[in-house]
Amino acid sequence: MPLRRTVSLLVVLVAILACHRGVGGPEAGATSSDGAVQQFLFAAKSQDLPAMSAVWGTAEGPLREREERRQLERRLLILICHLRHDESRMGAAQAGEEGKVMYRVEVMQGEKKGSPVFTTVKDRRTGRWFVESFDLPALQGFCTAGGAPPLPAKP
């Protein structure tokens, strides 16, 4: 096979694999459990879907590698709406079951305050940390009509 055709084939394969990853973006996971929460909150505040998807996952890795792109984007937009904030303060780490680490985070949006608990987990393969979940009902009043971020443009 000629070199030019081989290079073209490789470029196409790389493009296909890149599209398959979903939202894509920064390296998956954080180097620490508190770093995962901080990155997640900063990304939500900045409405940065790729950055959020980089630190949202389970012990099996980031959700962006296992979930359909549109579904993942929809879920992230809902989370962004609830996590819009002006300020946040992270409490001390609390040991959870199966190596999970939890943090109570005080989140302020104008006069509104909420204190969700974020649960982080370490990826079994890479050792990197992900936000596995947080207490969404603790931020119930944060996502109001007209306050939701716009949907991303269709590719």
Image (cartoon, helix red, strand yellow):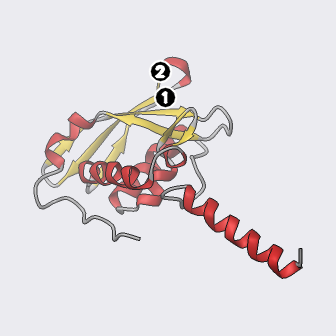
Q: Secondary structure at mark 1?
A: strand
Numbered-mark total: 2
Q: Could you say which quadrant of the image residue 107 lies in?
A: top left
Name the outermost residue toward the top: 97
Q: Residues within 10 Å of mark 2 (few under 14, many from 20)?
A: few
Q: Secondary structure at mark 2?
A: loop
Position of 104 with respect to 6 (left or right) is left
Horizontal and vertical percent for residue 109? 20, 53
Q: Which residue corresponds to mark 2?
A: 96
Image quarter where the C terminus lies is: bottom left
- The amino acid pointed to by label 1 is Val
Q: Which residue corresponds to mark 1?
A: 101
Q: Residues within 10 Å of mark 1 (few under 14, many from 20)?
A: many
Q: 23 or 140: which is nearer to us?
A: 23
Horizontal and vertical percent for residue 153? 34, 71
Q: In the figure, 38 relative to 26: above or below?
A: above
- The amino acid pointed to by label 2 is Gly
Q: Are marks 1 and 2 in contact (CB under 8 Å)?
A: yes
Q: In the figure, 139 relative to 73: above or below?
A: above
Of pointers 1 and 2, the one earlier in the residue sequence: 2
